[in-house]
Image: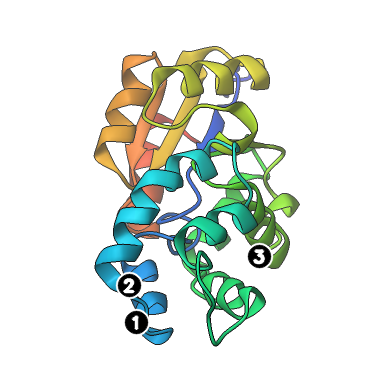
Amino acid sequence: MTNTRSTAPAFTLFWDIGGVLLTNGWDRDQRAGVVERFGLDASDFSERHKLVAPELELGRVTLDEYLDQTVFFEAREFSKDDFRAAMYAQSRPYPPTLDLARQLSNHHRMYALNNEGFDLNAHRIDTFKLDEFLQGFFTSCYLGVMKPNPVIYRLGVQLAHVPADRAVMIDDRIQNVEAARRTGMRAVQYVSAPQLQADLAALGVEV
């Protein structure tokens, strides 16, 4: 009997973390809430953040060094540990998407491809056990390049040793989706878990 099942190789999936698997870790809304809680000058913090944030996500400064430049350049009534804990507390899971990702990991190799600094990235991997279903973390702080720079997508498929046309980038930001497609990857813009599952199925990604 002839086996009619497709013999095409499975897709390799590349996941953004913030805004897809979890809430954003330290984006505008998260920063605003923490800045207000600690009574910081929002305008001053924003200007300081803009100067050093890319260096944080590129792995060129540590979280302590980032906090020294943005918050603790003068004496505070709260500690660096207090502020760091408030930052970490902004991360929340998206359970339906995490469940879908775990299902997909039964059939596909999967990696993270995201922008994040060392400390927050490690906290989120450990807290939400992302390493249970993601085989590696191609994060900006490790690679020294950030999305949507096309270099990071090329590095991702090269490190995973997969052809770009068998790779699917999942990201909530349209500019990152578009950038991935320009490098030859397939890409899906994430809105919700049901939408993602449907769009992946349309690409031929087995769930």
Does the CB distance between marks 3 and 1 fall below 8 Å? no
- Three-letter amino acid code at disc 2? Ala
Residue 48 in sight in this render: yes
- Three-letter amino acid code at disc 3? Phe
168 horizontally vs 123: left or right: left
Q: Which mark is residue 124?
A: none
The residue to which callout 1 is attached is: 36
Alpha-carbon span between mark 2 and mark 3: 23 Å
* Dot 2 crowding, Cα within 10 Å, few <14, some 14–19, many 20+: some
* Dot 1 crowding, Cα within 10 Å, few <14, some 14–19, many 20+: few
The residue to which callout 3 is attached is: 128
The residue to which callout 2 is attached is: 32
Does the CB distance between marks 2 and 1 fall below 8 Å? yes
Q: Nearer the viewer, residue 30 or 129?
A: 30
Residue 2 in sight in this render: no
Indicate which label's residue lies in the foreground, 2 or 3. 2
Q: Element at badge 3?
A: loop
Residue at coordinates 65% horizontally, 45% vertically from top-left?
Answer: 105
Q: Earlier in the sequence, mark 3 or mark 1?
A: 1
* Dot 3 crowding, Cα within 10 Å, few <14, some 14–19, many 20+: some
Q: Element at badge 2?
A: helix
Alpha-carbon span between mark 3 and mark 1: 26 Å
123 horizontally vs 196: left or right: right
- Three-letter amino acid code at disc 1? Glu
Alpha-carbon span between mark 2 and mark 1: 6 Å
Residue at coordinates 73% horizontally, 50% vertically from top-left?
Answer: 131
Residue at coordinates 44% horizontally, 33% vertically from top-left?
Answer: 169
Q: Position of residue 133 (x, y in %)?
A: 69, 49
